[in-house]
Image (cartoon, rainbow, N blue to C red):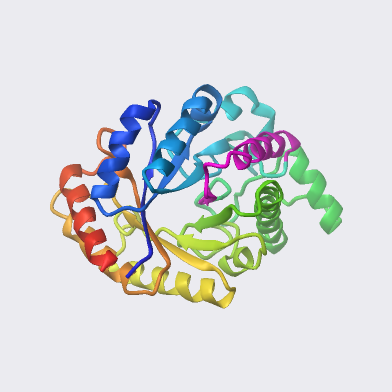
Amino acid sequence: MVKELGVAYYGFHFPDRAGEDFLEMMEHNCNAVLLAVSEYDYQVWYSNVITIAQKAKELGLKVYVNLWAFGKVFGGEAPSVFLQDNVNYRQVLSKEIPFPLVGACFNTEGFRKYFFDAVSKLAGEKVFDGFFWDEPHYIITGSREIYSCVCPKCRELFREKYGYDMPPKANEDVFEFKEESILDFLRQASKLVKKVDPQKSVTVCLMPFYTAEEQGVSWEKVCSIKEIDVFGTDPYWSVARKDMDFVSQASRETVEIAKKYGKKSQLWIQGFLIPAGKEEEVREAGRIIGNTDVDSIFTWAYRACEGSMVQSENPKKVWSIIKEVYAELKE
């Protein structure tokens, strides 16, 4: 039996309608929900976000908050208001003529203040059971040599640490610097949550990649952060063009590493961008994940993202299968 079964939920703005959705989630055997709160939601709909979270709590759901796609360095399709208003805090690509990217730099004071202020405010809301750091990453360039970020702040910090200027092509010092930058960001954000409310849990979900070029941070080093309570990954086999062995390996390693560091584990089922005719793969993946002694299982996202740019081709069928899979996992 898996104790926690949940689903991500975004695009919500009205408490009464959200309440109906929460009841549907519970009918689908969920006992938890992850509210994916975009920068737009946070800045424009804050009051309703809190009321919606309270509605979920009243119905008996655990409620977690995800600062969804903040700065475009956390997972998600949502646009970033911060990047729109702060071009100078964007990541910069290492090319002969450097240019800014659609992603905030983890090291800039501007983005750190923006993100940490949001964390502090949300952590003060009693309604949330915990925070979710969603796929923190540098912009992936697809090249081992060309990298991000070489903004003025990164150049300054790199020279202070290594004693020479950031190179035009990535080397091991660059990979180490990027890794430590993400680790420090996660460490400070997690400490802030615990400082405001020690009872709130902190979950980190890393993409199932293992090299510095792809992600910039190791699973084990993230798990070594004291303030992190839950470690997870999202082996989205279809978008990664992988088979079920990929799901099995990533799931097994996640649970093993989490146990090694005394953390709980969390695994995600892909419920979006499932091609027509491939829906039964969702069931297969759910069963594989459910057989790993994992503590928490979530699906991205509610109703298989129906109506969004990442909806499954037959979202109603995928959502129905999730209900059946969760019924099995409850038992």
Give the camera-side residue of 173 and 137.
137
Q: Is residue 218 above or below residue 240?
A: below
In the rendered image, residue 267 lying in the magenta stretch gets the answer no
Which image quadrant for residue 219? bottom right
The reply to whether residue 97 is in sight is: no
Q: How many marks?
A: 0
Tell me what residue is drawn at x 65 percent, y 26 percent: 86
When the figure is inspected, residue 250 is found, relative to residue 59, above or below; the finding is below
Q: Picture coordinates of residue 84 (x, y %)? A: 58, 24
Q: Nearer the viewer, residue 79 or 155?
A: 79
- As drawn, is 195 to the left or to the right of 31? right
In the rendered view of the protein, which quadrant contains the C terminus? bottom left
User: Which x, y percent locates residue 165?
Assistant: 80, 50
Residue 123 painted magenta:
yes
x, y percentage for residue 247? 34, 67
Q: Quadrant of residue 225?
A: bottom right
- Residue placed most toward the observer, 232 or 137: 232
Toward which corner of the image does residue 118 lie, by quadrant? top right
Residue sitting at x 80%, y 48%: 157
For the view shown, which residue lies furthest in the left direction? Answer: 277
Residue 194 seen anywhere in this rendered image of the structure: yes
Q: Which residues are magenta?
A: 108-135
Depth check: 127 or 141 in front?
A: 127
Q: Residue at x 49, y 24 (%)?
A: 45
Does residue 200 appear left or right of residue 177 in this picture? left
Residue 53, percent across and down? 45, 38
